[in-house]
Every structure is written in structure tokens, then in C-alpha cells.
Amino acid sequence: MKKKLEKYRKSKYEFYENPVNIKEKTYTIKSESLNKVPILFRNTIPEIPSTTYGTFSIYKYPAKFIPQVIAFVLKRYAKKGMKIFDPFAGYGTVGLVSRVYGYDYELWDLDPLINTIHEVATIREPKINPPELMQRIRKSQVEFIPQWSNLRYWFPEKFLPILSKTWGLVNSLPHETRNILLIPLLKATRYFSYSDEKTHKLYKSKYSKKKIENLLKKDWQSQFYNMVEKEIYILLKKIQEYNYFDLKQVKYKIKSGIDTLDTKLDNNVNILITSPPYLQAQEYIRSTKLELFWLGYKESYIRELSKKEIPYRPVPKIKIYSSKYYEFREKIEENHLKRLYDRYFHAILGTFSMLGESVTDYMCIFVGPAKIRTTPIPIDDIVIEHLKEYGWKHEITFIDRIVSRVMFKSKINPAPFLPVSK
């Protein structure tokens, strides 16, 4: 049954050139006009002072959620005892924010880097002595060499002895001490590579080649050790900031290296909050494979992960219940782009249809603007149309300056989910 439409008061955000100059205005509107509401999420959660506060930002990661987005959803929709789920968790912000507000959570991602980030980001009271650790690192004779056939393409030969001995020492340390050093060392390792650390994509740029040339002309050994030590102190400060929150004891589960397209939830969850890969997304595994190699993952495993990325892999076809999907598909002329378009929507819509069976209350899906050539693709509208066929009611779409965020609410007493054949 559709709920009776009633008048009620809502907050609206009016935007100006300077994002700081936002004024909140209360006014009366009808429910029908709430389909799309402008908002600036970073200004909605006063208890989180910035988007990079604490361990919400300890490492650069592509398409990372800002914590205020997750906090907004939890404060608006979650109730005590609910469980939160993100099937495309990436950096893992959903889990970190869930701890702040006291909700159990489950995170999935293809990229195993989520394990390292989450373990480091949730350390409570680190007990380490940075100067003493740096002395041990400088004297290390234990070596670790990644099993990577392109290692010397990405690193000058001169850098490898110090890198391998530093990683060798770190890998020999007790678990918590090792965790404290992983993020600083990953940052330094990336900086001392031919990778352009200013971008997510792993590639050699003019800047990165010049960077290495300049490093080799200086006392780069001292610069490396100084960078590691500096990053240790930065991380310790961020861990301290995160622990200023009244963090709750919660249960959680993390599954990494899994294929979300064919994985089902073991138990029901209350709220799904996620951002699926972009329509023409960069390859996330390619973006982080330098880190994965130094963390000890094997080349064959990383290669297998890359083959599972959306939208660059074959996916099972489903019946798509969206007129807009077919309307915009007709506008795509090139076959390879049409194939990418098909794979993307069959992948994400199939995933949401399947996982939606185990979501009892809300799905909050966050999508970014997307184009194929010059044609904007209304991903949010296509998702809305399709999920309605599975008993989901579109509640509201919040639009901020970065991404369009779509939220759904389950019908009262929804019918059981039934698979749809082609």
C-alpha cells in the first residue's frame, strides 16, 4: 500500500559559490516534491569536524566515502540494534562510522587492501616508540622482495635494498606494531616509486619521472627514513582523533577478495549503504596493486582479482525493468561502449536485486555523475525504476555537489523475492 501523502516540514539547503555560505531554510512542502533534494553532506554532521578527520582518511583510495555521508544515513534511518552492510566497501568508511554510532556491520570488497586499512584505522591505544622503531629500521638486514615481475619497472634499482630491508623488518614485528608501520611505509614506498602518487591510477607521468630524477640527486636515503617517521606521527595523531569519539563495542565481519556479483549474505541486514563502481570506473585493483604486492599478495592472485572488476568482465544477464535503461542504450552507437553499458547495469542491478532479498529496511545507493561520450546517463533513475519491480519504494534522492545519492525503503510486508528469468 502506498502511504497517504501528508504535508510536513523539511530542511532545504540553498547553495552559493562559496560552499561555506550555506543557509538552512525551513519550509512546508508536499511529499511529491521531495524526490530530489540538494544537500551538502559535509556540513550536516557537526560532531565530525572535517572529511579527513581521524582515521576516516589515513590513505588515499579511489572514490572514498566521506564520513558525513554515512553518519547522515545512520542518524536519519538507523535504529538501535540494526546491522549495516556495504557490498562495495572500498576504504571501509561505512564500518568506521558504524563504530562511532554503535551499529554492527559487514563489509565486502574485491580489493584486499580493505583488511589493512580497517585494522590500522581501528587500533585503540597504540604502544610504540617511533624513534626506537626508526633505529631498528635503519639497521635492518632482514629482506622482503615482492613477487612482482614488473618490480624494477616501477622502482629504481638503487631504492630496492632500503625498501626490501625496511619491509623485511616491518614484517618481522609483532602484529600491532607492524600495523602501525604499514600505512606510513606504504605511503613512502609509493612516493619512492615511478608511480605518480598524486593520482589514484598507477602510471608513470612526467612528474613522477622527474621526481625520481631529483631524488637520486639528493640524500634520498635520509629523505625516505624521515618520511616514514613523519608519517608515523601523522597516523598516531589520526588514531588519537578517531578514539576521541565514544566508540562502541560492535560486531563486524569483513570479506575481501570476493566477487560481490555471485555472493549472498549469510544473514539478513537492516540497511545497505554503498557506492557501486562508476560506469566508466578506473580499475581499482590496478590502482592499488603496488600496495598489494608489497603487502605480500602474489601476482597470480592479483591478476585473478583484476579479472573480476566491474564493468570490464562478462556478467550474467538479467531482465532489466527500466525504460530509461533502454532509452539511453539506444543513444550509444559504438559497440564496445554499448557492451560496457550493458555489463555495468546487468552487474549492479543484478547485485542489488539479489542482495535486496536479505535487506529488511533500507538500501542507500550512492552514485556519481556518468557520461558515455557526451551523453549523461541517469544511473539513479535507472536504479530506481528497476528496484521498484522488486518491492522497493523510492523515498528520496539527495544531490550534493559531488554525487547523487539514492535511497529506498522497503514496502510494508513486501512480497517474497522471486528470481526473474530472461
Image (cartoon, rainbow, N blue to C red):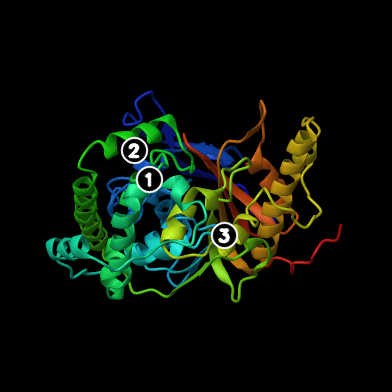
At label 2, the amino acid type is: Ile
Quadrant hosting residue 242: bottom left
Counting from the top left corner in percent of width and height, residue 162 is at: 28, 56
User: In the rendered structure, which disc, 1 or 3, sits on the residue that comes first in sequence?
Assistant: 1
Look at label 1 and name its amino acid. Answer: Pro
Q: What residue do we see at 70% from left, 52% from top?
A: 313
Q: How many C-alpha atoms fall within 10 Å of the one at disc 2: few (<14), some, or many (≥20)?
A: some
Q: Which residue in the protein does label 2 denote?
A: 212
Query: Does residue 286 lie above or below 356 as drawn?
Result: above
Q: Is residue 387 visible?
A: no
Q: Position of residue 54 (x, y in %)?
A: 28, 54
Q: Which residue occupies the foreground of this view, 184 or 220?
A: 220
**Nearer-the-camera pick, 149 or 339:** 149
Label placed on residue 360: none
Q: Position of residue 309 (x, y in %)?
A: 62, 53
Q: CA distance from mark 2 to mark 1?
A: 8 Å
Look at the numbered disc 1 and give the secondary structure of its residue. Answer: loop
* Residue sitting at x 58%, y 51%: 276
Query: Where does the N terminus fall, quadrant-wise?
Result: bottom right
* Point 64% across, 51% down: residue: 310
Front position among marks 2 and 1: 1
Query: Does residue 265 appear anywhere in the picture?
Result: yes
Using the image, tell me which numbered label, if any, was put on residue 362.
Answer: 3
The answer to whether the residue labelled 2 contacts the one labelled 3, judged by CB atoms less than 8 Å apart, is no
Horizontally, is 90 left or right of 419 in the view? left
On the rendered image, what quadrant is the C terminus found in? Answer: bottom right
Kindly identify which residue carries mark 1.
Answer: 156
